[in-house]
Image (cartoon, rainbow, N blue to C red):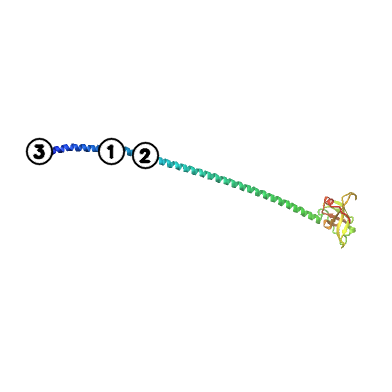
């Protein structure tokens, strides 16, 4: 029995160191594997960090580019809007100038028309009463306007200047005075030119007891009339 227990002890003693050696080798192998695997893991981590850093940098660069392009577009839009505003302002100023010039032209034309109308009214007034500014003539009484009374009557122009005398009276078939022939120009009966004036051109009345004939025509207009040719 003692012999059997000793043999068993020897077997155990022999097996334990072998098992211990085996465990130590296994532990060393595991540590080696861990040590081998750790650098790979570190390298992978560094690669991931580097990759993330690159992606982040590219994204930031893209963002900066987009912001720059957006700013450039905004500046271009602002410049175009300002240019359009300037063009609109210039167009409005040009239209205002044209309207002002047109208004001034219309005002000038209206002033000229008013002056012409006033002059025409004065001419009509002078035709009705050629001596409006001078002594008024008395109206002829009924029966005083005869050929004998009118022949030789002094005649005055629109400026109340003596221009000649009535040399002939033309009457119609009913006996009414139709026109008179006035000798204008000349001197002392020499160089006078007879011209025909209708009753519409004349204002006949009395002044200081004498019959006078007045016309709204000027001396120049009378002298420019064609010479009367008796039939």
Which disc, if any, is residue 47?
A: 2
Observer-nearest of 56 and 85? 56
Label of residue 33 in the image: 1
Q: Please provide percent x and percent y for residue 183.
A: 88, 52
* Of pointers 3 and 1, the one earlier in the residue sequence: 3
- Count of numbered marks: 3
The C terminus lies in quadrant: bottom right
Q: Earlier in the sequence, mark 3 or mark 2?
A: 3
Instruction: Point out which mark residue 3 bears.
Output: 3
- 62 is higher (above) or lower (below) than 223: above
Residue nearest the viewer, comparing 162 with 194: 194
| Residue 101 horizontal side relative to residue 16, left or right | right
Mark sitting earlier along the chain (2/1): 1
Camera-side residue: 110 or 75?
Answer: 75
* In the foreground, 150 or 132: 150
- The answer to whether residue 72 is visible is yes
Q: Which residue occupies 34% across, 38% down?
A: 43
Q: Considering the numbered disc 2 on the image, is that residue within a helix, a strand or a loop?
A: helix
SS class of the residue under badge 1?
A: helix
Question: Where is residue 45, by image quadrant?
Answer: top left
Q: Quadrant of residue 46?
A: top left
**Is residue 123 left or right of 50 when viewed as pictured?**
right
Regarding residue 207, the answer to whether it shows in the image is no
Q: CA distance from mark 2 to mark 1?
A: 21 Å
Q: Name the element at disc 3.
A: helix
Residue 221 location (% of width, % of height)? 82, 51
Pointer 2 with pointer 1, Cβ within 8 A: no
Q: Are marks 3 and 2 in contact (CB under 8 Å)?
A: no
Measuring 67% from the left and 50% from the top, which residue is drawn there? Answer: 102
């Amino acid at each position: 029995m003692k012999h059997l227990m000793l043999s068993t002890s020897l077997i155990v003693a022999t097996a334990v160191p072998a098992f211990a050696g085996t465990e130590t080798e296994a532990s060393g192998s595991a540590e080696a594997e861990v040590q081998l695997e750790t650098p790979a893991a570190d390298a992978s981590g560094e690669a991931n960090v580097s990759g993330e850093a690159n992606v982040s940098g590219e994204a930031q660069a893209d963002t900066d580019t987009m912001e720059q392009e957006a700013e450039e577009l905004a500046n271009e839009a602002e410049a175009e809007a300002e240019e359009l505003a300037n063009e609109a302002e210039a167009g409005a100023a040009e239209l205002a100038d044209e309207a002002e010039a047109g208004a001034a032209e219309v005002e000038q034309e209206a002033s000229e028309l008013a002056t012409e109308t006033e002059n025409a009214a004065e001419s009509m007034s002078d035709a009705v009463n050629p001596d409006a500014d001078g002594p008024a003539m008395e109206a002829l009484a009924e029966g005083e306007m005869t050929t004998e009374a009118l022949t030789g009557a002094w005649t005055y122009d629109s400026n109340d200047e003596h221009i000649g005398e009535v040399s002939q009276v033309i009457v119609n078939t009913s006996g009414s005075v139709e026109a008179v022939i006035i000798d204008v120009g000349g001197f002392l009966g020499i160089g006078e030119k007879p011209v025909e004036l209708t009753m519409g051109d004349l204002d006949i009345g009395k002044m200081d007891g004498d019959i006078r004939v007045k016309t709204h025509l000027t001396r120049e207009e009378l002298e420019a009339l064609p010479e009367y040719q008796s039939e």
